Amino acid sequence: MPDEIHSRPEVTAALARGVTRLLSDHGLASLLEVPLANGRRADVMALTAKGEIWIVETKSCLADYAVDLKWPDYIEYCDRFFFAVTESFPLELIPEEVGLIVADGFGGAVLRDSPVRPLAGARRKAVTLHFARLAAFRAGA
């Protein structure tokens, strides 16, 4: 899906769909647009069977990535942090200290795993409870 023939919202939606499919294929439960306690909003948050929390930020194009100076703010709310981009994105721009996913509307692949930065117990409990309550509210809506 070449970025230049699709609108930015279409590319963002396709990336989110592909990322959630990839995560589901690997046994992770995910939610889109998860507000965090610091006022930020994670594009995708996922929970592993062991309780590990992942955040994936989708970047629809180079301009979207270039203006994102807030991504370090997400690290304190997850065990692993990834960027998800399209296959036409210049991958060398993604920092080595985060994970990298390439996706489209049908799925994706983890090209580089994220280092694990284990959350403190109290933060893990708070984020996991927030994730569960948000999922329950959305399921009941």
Image: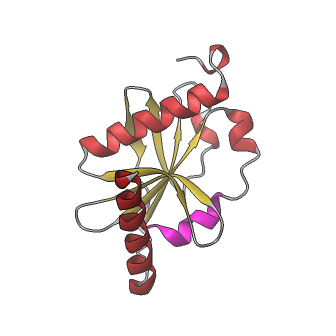
Determine if the magenta segment contains residue 54. Answer: no
Where residue 130 sits in the image (x, y, percent)?
43, 70
**Which segment is the magenta one?**
71-78
Residue at the spot 51% in from the left edge and 27% down from the top edge? 87
Tell me the quarter of the picture where residue 126 sits.
bottom left
Residue at x 38% of width, y 33% of height: 108
Image quarter for residue 76?
A: bottom right
Taken as a whole, is the magenta stretch helix, strand or loop? helix
Residue 4 vs 60, above or below: the answer is: above
- Tell whether 27 sits left or right of 100: left
Q: Residue at x 33, y 37 (%)?
A: 21
Counting from the top left corner in percent of width and height, residue 94 is at: 60, 45
- In the drawing, does residue 73 fall left or right of residue 21? right
Q: Image quadrant of residue 41?
A: bottom right
Residue shown at 70% from the left, 34% from the top:
62
Q: Residue furthest bottom?
A: 122
